[in-house]
């Protein structure tokens, strides 16, 4: 059962949880993948409720979003297993079926094709309505050096020279899985 919510009634909670890590889930060509994120924004643009996520250019999730521009945002509640966030932030969906490995329970979404995750019950269903790659020239040098070091390989643990793509997801539904 899903309890419909007004996303802005939970805005503070969502933003606080993002600092701990939340998931985005994608689906393409029959494959489902979840990725941990710690950066994003919740707001209003073009008179639409928006959840904007940042995905690095080289991530498997980027490929999936480009093939199917829909995603769910999956947020922990009181008793959620924080190990889910850790595993989904350290393994690639290209090589690992994280849903199966973590024994996650998928719930059909109400509007989009990407499922929700019962274990992370606060759910936002989003459709990408705009995307844009970051312009390195417009990022302050100190931030560029810290978050996008160009002297390391993109696959190096803890470092990544690839910039992000901002995906603006219109929130088409929001609820808590009970």
Image (spheres, grey):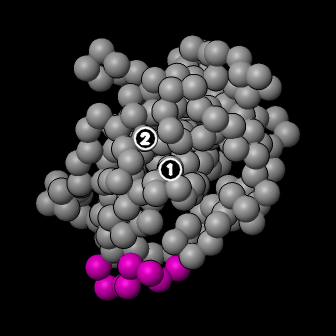
Task: Please identify the quadrant where the C terminus is shown.
Answer: top right
The magenta-colored residue range is 150-157
Rendered location of residue 72, percent (x, y): 53, 39
Residue closest to the eye, 32 or 143:
32
**Residue for badge 1:** 26
Q: Residue 37: say if magenta.
A: no
Q: Residue 151: say if magenta.
A: yes
Rendered location of residue 69, percent (x, y): 37, 44
Task: Please identify the quadrant where the N terminus is shown.
Answer: top right
**Mark 2 and mark 1: Cα distance apart in space:** 7 Å
* Disc 2 to disc 1: CB gap under 8 Å: yes
Q: Which mark is residue 70?
A: 2
Which residue does the image show at 49% across and 33% down from the upper left? 112
> How packed is label 1: few (under 14 Cα within 10 Å), some, or many (20 or more)?
many
Which residue does the image show at 51% across and 26% down from the upper left? 111
- How many numbered discs? 2
State whether residue 5 is above or below residue 68. Answer: above
Q: Secondary structure at mark 1?
A: strand
Main SS of the magenta part reads: loop
Rendered location of residue 16, percent (x, y): 61, 36
Residue closest to the eye, 45 or 125:
125
Which residue does the image show at 32% across and 47% down from the upper left? 166
Can you name the residue that lies furthest to the front here? Answer: 30
Which residue does the image show at 53% across and 17% down from the upper left? 8
State whether residue 29 is above or below residue 70. Answer: below
Can you name the residue that lies furthest to the left here? Answer: 137
State whether residue 31 is above or below residue 106. Answer: below
When asked about the image quadrant of residue 35, the answer is bottom right
131 horizontally vs 65: left or right: left
């Amino acid at each position: 059962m899903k309890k419909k919510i007004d996303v802005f009634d939970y805005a503070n909670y969502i933003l606080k949880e993002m600092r701990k890590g939340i998931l985005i889930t994608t689906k393409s060509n029959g494959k489902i993948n979840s990725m941990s994120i710690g950066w994003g924004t919740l707001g209003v643009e073009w008179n639409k409720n928006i959840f904007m996520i940042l995905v690095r250019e080289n991530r498997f999730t980027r490929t999936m979003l480009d093939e199917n521009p829909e995603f769910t945002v999956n947020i922990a509640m009181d008793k959620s297993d924080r190990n889910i966030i850790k595993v989904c932030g350290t393994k690639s969906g290209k090589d690992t079926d994280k849903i199966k490995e973590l024994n996650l329970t998928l719930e059909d979404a109400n509007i989009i094709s990407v499922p929700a995750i019962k274990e992370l019950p606060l759910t936002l269903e989003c459709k990408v309505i705009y995307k844009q790659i970051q312009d390195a020239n417009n990022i302050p040098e100190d931030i560029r050096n810290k978050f996008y070091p160009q002297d390391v390989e993109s696959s190096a643990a803890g470092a990544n020279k690839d910039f992000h793509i901002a995906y603006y997801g219109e929130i088409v539904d929001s609820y808590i899985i009970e």
